[in-house]
Image (cartoon, helix red, strand yellow):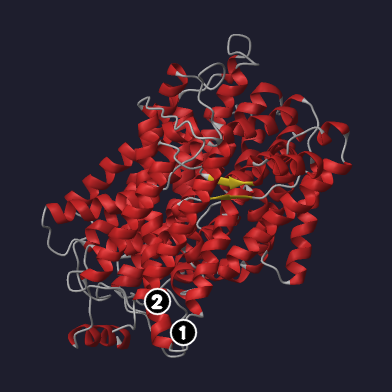
Amino acid sequence: MEKEKQYNDDFAAGADPSSLNENAFRELKDGETYRPMMNPTGKYREATPYSVGMGLLLAVIFSAAAAYLGLKVGQVFEAAIPIAIIAVGLSGALKLKNPLGQNVIIQSIGACSGVIVAGAIFTLPAIYILQAKYPVEKYPEMDVNFMQVFLSSLLGGVLGILFFIPFRKYFVKDMHGKYPFPEATATTQVLASGENKENQGQALTLIVASLIGGVYDYVVETFGFWANTLTTTATQWGQTLAAKTKLVLSCNVSAALLGLGYIIGLKYAFIICAGSFFVWWVLIPLMGTYGSPEIVAMQPVDIFNDYAKLIGIGGIAMAGVIGIIKSWDIIKQAVGLARKEFKVGAEVEKPIRWQWDISMKKVVFFMGIAVLAVLLFFYFGVVTNLIQALVAWIVVIAIAFLFTTVAANAIAIVGTNPVSGMTLMTLIIASAILVGIGLNGTAGIVAAMIIGGVVCTALSMAGGFVTDLKVGYWLGSTPRVQESWKFLGTLVSAATVGGVMLLLNNVYGFTGEDALVAPQANAMAKVIEPLMMGGDTPWILYMVGVILALLLNWLGVPALAFCLGMFIPLHLNTPLLVGGAIAYLLQKSSKDSKVTAARQERGTLIASGLIAGGALFGVFAALTKFFGYNYTAGISELNLQVYALIAYVLLIAYFVWDSFRVKKLK
């Protein structure tokens, strides 16, 4: 009751509900509280026919688009930011009164598309890929139907939601200011800009940065007036260096990644890049110089994909286990809360609206239904042996639950979910167990990939859901409403993805000329085939990653961030360091704390704009290519590199100059 009175007094005293509190993105001082934009005790329109209907419509549209683009180019764009931009634009065009609560629900439901797509297309197309080698006519068990794809995505998504709800309070509220939450920050800034009527300056800064970042990324991806990645291999001396020592330096010049690096900050950006530098500047040169003749003859990128990256996968898996051990108290706390609610006659105090989750009684009840549904799906829809179905079920439930905190941690730190790496590790573990109990061959391939699809979708959903709930926390939504309607978004997205995937397989296929690339699924197929059909598995490389993660943890280095850097290509990590350096520059830019705070806040707006613009215009660029527009600028590779350097320096200069223009916070 004291909390409710405090929040009501704040709003009655004229607290500004049209902008985010200045302590939204930093750690709270002793005795300090965070006040969201919407009054935590007030009543707001959230789940309405308009918001739910629009959220579902956007979930269908973005699920179809993300599935095609992900399979075509290997990248699943983050749907949350474009959907937030659309929600704000529509509420403005329709002149809705106080639309913030509804916009959050639109974004939350619509964002199911990206996470469900990632879970499905990273795994299930591997079955179609392997059908080229093991045709259905000869191996009928290799046939996959709509219900298998649909249920794999649906059940994985439901598990991800239910497994994360008990951890919401810890990640979203208790760790306030301790994690950067890059994507959630950008999404929140977009949604908040729609409410910012009195301070149009912040909204204008966000819009200008979005346009600059969006047009910048669209031009380079569509017209190629400059290279999208600076690399030493574009020069003669760089090629010689790569050939002799396998040493390469590269940096993507994307505006979105620059903004992402700023929000991540220098500390985590440096750790991530340290992992990347260790792989590209130590491991790859060592392998390429002293390895077997086969490895010595390979290009650095091939050594990375076939060998060094696998060490990163082992490291991510071990970092996940370490994270689970460290989070054990949190897990016990969540279990204890459920047990407390189940006590007969127990009185549970109803929290204020802003912290009101689905009750643990209902969460546990629906968990029971979900895990039973997974078991029935495995037994009747995947394998017909009860023992094998039970073993597969135990593996899926255990890994999906325990790695939920790992997925949430990764999203909170770097905005990137290492779901493909964790799924690869799941496939390896599950396949080794299934082979041990007699499930192998083509039947084992199908079983393992569908199992991997459930886990992959569960972890993808858990990572994406923490973003939605963090956005809701900053803005003041009701978690219970977000959690409840997330299930419907998952159902619609899973049905859309299942239909689109079967359609794309029939039209384009995943093997042969002009087929869809599906790089992650190809990697899964490459790993699963030798495990199930008899072949060599790189256990030594995985174990090196495991030992490395243990050493990092012993030295006090965040193992997950470091190993993420090892897993993600170098050119996607180095721009994070550039953005982190800008954040550090603004942090040290003035002796006046108010000036520094103002510059950092403006920097956050600009970075959010660059991410939002890059994400939205990235969709436009992909659609442009989809409709067959291919433009060749006819510029030499060296000149493309020079122009890229000039463009990137100008983008950085704009970022710093615009951040320094602000004087003090009001």
Q: Nearer the viewer, residue 233 or 470?
A: 233
Task: Say what amino acid the circle numbered 2 marks.
Answer: Arg
Q: Find disc 2 in the rendering and name its residue.
A: 599
Find residue 25 and report its horizontal and vertical position in percent: 42, 73
Q: Is residue 83 left or right of residue 653?
A: left
Q: Nearer the viewer, residue 599 or 373?
A: 599
Find residue 347 and report its horizontal and vertical position in percent: 38, 76
Which residue: 25% across, 72% down?
A: 38
Residue 359 in view of the camera: no
Check disc 1 and report its element: helix, strand or loop: loop
Residue 268 in view of the camera: yes
Q: Nearer the viewer, residue 538 or 142?
A: 538
Which residue: 54% across, 35% down?
A: 636
Find residue 244 and report its horizontal and vertical position in percent: 81, 41
Q: Residues within 10 Å of mark 1 (few under 14, many from 20)?
A: some
Quadrant holding the C terminus: bottom left
Mark closest to the chain's N terminus, 2 or 1: 1
Task: Say what amino acid the circle numbered 1 marks.
Answer: Ser
Q: Find disc 1 in the rendering and name its residue.
A: 590
Which residue: 23% across, 83% down?
A: 15
Is the Cβ of the residue at disc 2 closer than 8 Å to that at disc 1?
yes
Q: CA distance from mark 2 to mark 1?
A: 9 Å
